[in-house]
Image (cartoon, rainbow, N blue to C red):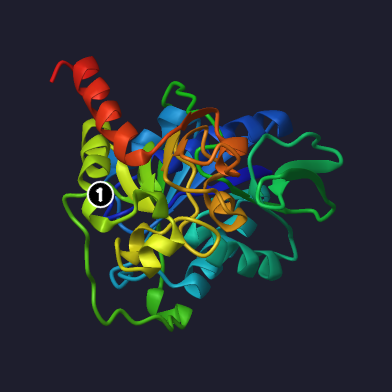
Amino acid sequence: MSVLIFVENWDGKFKKLSFELISYGAKVAEMLNTEVVALSVGYVEESELVKLGNYGATRIISAVSDNMNVFDSQAYTSIIADIAKQEHAKVIILSNNNSGKAVAPRLSVSLKAGLGAGVSKLPLSIDPFIVYKKVYSGNAFSNLMIKTDISILTLAQNSFELIETANNAGITKVVIDWNGLSVKTKVIEVQKQSGKILLTDADVVVSGGRGMKSPDNWPPLAELADLLGAATACSRPVSDEGWRPHEEHTGQTGKIIAPNLYFAIGISGATQHLAGVSSSKFIVAINTDKDAPIFSAAQYGIIGDAGKVLPKLVEAVKELKGK
């Protein structure tokens, strides 16, 4: 028996969420009194793979193929399912990001396993297997009982602390026949963003809404983000108006994020927007309307005009940083 964790890599490198998955999985394995097996698919240097052992992986399986150059949810499902059977996995854990959301349901069908999507805490009980997850855009929670022999969980990003351990993980290399997996995804073009913090990876996000009044008023917001080493984001009306690119749109119909700190500047906090940011650890809201819904979700709030508050906030951060 084991806990199997699928850890995604980006150009051969693991990110914080990969180590978060391992830390979480190690605690689940501790509850089950079993081992943690980390599964990496695609070529990753051994020096990078061993990092997984720093967060609790007992063993590491590296599945590689000469032709493996694209993420294909069906192919990845087949690989993970086969490894899960070989390892007699009792629990399979993936990230609740785009890749995890694409693979987990397929894996659930393939293994006839119950799925707990977007969990944010350790299981409340092992027998029966009960997990905690937020529902209704974070306004409520549910305790989900999984009755199947195998349980599949997708972990909400930034919901579990990193726990470093001694590295004693061995690495096993498995060669995959990629051509035999009926890969249907074809990459036509690749465009990579550079010189900018990715919104889904950022620990701090500075976001603006219609309360910014004009795209011409964005420089102070961008300056604040630069000072804090943060990513920039926006509400849907802002991206729809063309003030900011659609890739920065957060909310139910945009990117769902969970940074440590989220600045909502000139954002009223409609339900659709809060659905995408409610998992942030801390929310700071700036709005002229004291009754704006965003204040009910925020830990800190400033009632005021963003055009007047932002420059003062920028100056305060500069003073704090000695700039």
Place residue 248 in its image quadrant. bottom left
Quadrant in the picture for the C terminus: top left
Q: Toward the viewer: 147 or 195?
A: 195
**Residue 78 visible to an observer of this rendering:** yes
Asked if 168 appears above or below 251 in the picture, the reply is above
Q: Is residue 121 left or right of residue 65?
A: right
Q: Residue at x 60, y 44 (%)?
A: 293
Where is mark 1, residue-wise? 218
Residue at the (51%, 44%) spot, across then down: 157
Q: Position of residue 200 (x, y in %)?
A: 40, 50
Closest to the observer, 229 or 41:
229
Query: At numbered mark 1, what does the secondary structure look like: helix, strand or loop?
Result: loop
Q: Residue at x 43, y 32 (%)?
A: 53
The three-letter amino acid code for the residue at tag 1 is Trp
The reply to whether residue 15 is in sight is no
In the image, residue 102 lies at what x, y percent?
Answer: 54, 67
Q: Position of residue 225 (x, y in %)?
A: 27, 38
